Image: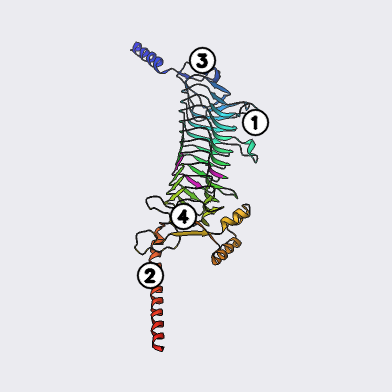
Amino acid sequence: MKQIVCILISFFTLSFGSVAFAEEDNPLQQLIDEAKPNDTIELEAKVYEGDLLIDKPLTIIGQDGTVIQGTRTGNVIQIESDHVTLQNLEVKGSGMSRDSREEFSGIRIIGNNCTLDHITITESFHGVLLNRIDGSTLTNLTILGKRSESLSEQGNGIHILRSSDNIIENSYMEGFRDGIYVEYSDNNEINNNTMTNTRYGMHYMYSDYNSFTDNEFINNVGGAAIMHSDYIQLKNNKFSFNQGTRSFGLLIQTSREVEALQNEFHLNQRGLLLEHATNNHIEGNEFFQNKIGIEVWASSISNTFSQNIFTKNTNHVLTVGKNAINSWADNRGNGNYWDEPMIDLDRDGVGDIPLEYTSSLGDLIEKSDELAYLFLDSPAVQVYERANAILGNQDVMALDPYPLLLEKEKSNSLWIAIASVVIFSGVIYAFVRFRRRKNYES
């Protein structure tokens, strides 16, 4: 029987690697150096000294209370091999200096197909840095940054450089310059993460064919900034409480073929901001209680807005500069939902006449060098809007040929229709009486 057990142990060791246990007097780096490729190292619930270099395929598994403490002079863990897995670790104490040749991280990955799972990273410049790698999975990470008034003293939660086909999901980032920074990296999936208390929750540059689903961008200067990137899909994300004079939920800048689908924009200075953005599709999003729902600069053209819901925004739409040429309905005849009074005599849920959403604030913002953002809720701006409405000095911000009625507006439209019929009938009756009386007198 013992021989059989020994044979089985030998078989699994040769096939899958061995299991090593970190001992009290055995430094972790020594264990890593002595391990064979594909070995598994199981750590105790104690503090281990960094900085660590992993240059072969390994699995390192910690438990509650396992800490890798860096020397605060470099990367706490540097992975230079493919197929490395780290699980259940707390990593802390990278170098913070900007004078070195590289910016240091809690975990720096230079190998492909690596996995980070249930990792907490604190007291580090960047949390995780991916550099020229592909096919890695980062999941269940908690990355907390060092808050500072100077952005130069803050790194990014996850910093992705020239790295593609990676998955980042179920993670939380707080207190960084950018929660996730992506540059020259294609075909990544970023799902179900939360970014808060950052400059940008996500900052995205020169990267194509990426998708972002079910993320939350809360209480940042800017929720997510998509810049110089094409063929991006953002779906079912939440952009909330991104407040400040220049704040936004989502910025699409110098980008095309971006799909923003079924996202929520709530209590932002500006929900969605488009600058130099062309051929993007904005569909099925909800804009509610923002200062400005959508702000479109004149440089943004050929964008399509359809089936979006606008409720309780201070301004639903503002166009800054000359009116941009965009479509406020898709080619299937679907406009947008507006909490504006409309007539729907045939009760089909579509307004009987096109909706013109007008405002005079676009011109004011342009002429005031954007100082008007400070006073969007002030009585003076409200008086300015009403006065221009009376004088007919407002510009058309959005022209929706097939405006869709919200449920509450459907019932209102019936009363509007009835009132219109009554008023019209009254006018006809008065006109007929007037003509009869005039004929009688003559």
- Residue that appears at 39% across and 50% down: 331
Query: Does any portion of residue 373 appear in the rendered image?
Result: no
Residue 152 falls left or right of residue 62? right
Give the percent coordinates (x, y) of residue 91: 55, 29
The N terminus is located in which quarter? top left
Q: Which mark is residue 75?
A: none
**Relative to 61, does residue 150 appear above or below in the rendering?**
below
Residue 98, disc = 1
The type of residue carrying mark 2 is Ile
The residue stretch that appears in magenta: 222-239
Q: Nearer the viewer, residue 301 or 421?
A: 301
Query: Magenta region, mostly helix, strand or loop?
Result: strand
Measured along the vertical axis of the image, is residue 57 above or below residue 365?
above
Measuring from the top left, give residue 19's x and y in whole percent.
45, 19
Q: Residue at x 60, y 54 (%)?
A: 365
According to the picture, the residue beneath numbered tag 4 turns out to be: 310
Between marks 3 and 2, how big is the CA–CA gap? 85 Å
At label 3, counting other C-alpha atoms closer than 10 Å, the crowd grade (few under 14, some 14-19, many 20 or more) is: few
Q: Amino acid at mark 1?
A: Arg
Is residue 382 visible in the rendered structure shown here?
yes
Dot in front, 1 or 3: 1
Q: CA distance from mark 2 to mark 1?
A: 70 Å
Q: Which mark is residue 34?
A: 3
Name the amino acid type tagged 3: Glu
Residue drawn at point x = 57 percent, y = 35 percent: 156
Frontmost of labels 4 and 3 is 4
Which residue occupies 42% across, 52% down? 329
Q: Residue 324: give x, y in percent of width and height.
A: 51, 51
Q: Of helix, strand and loop, which one carries label 4?
A: strand
Name the amino acid type tagged 4: Phe
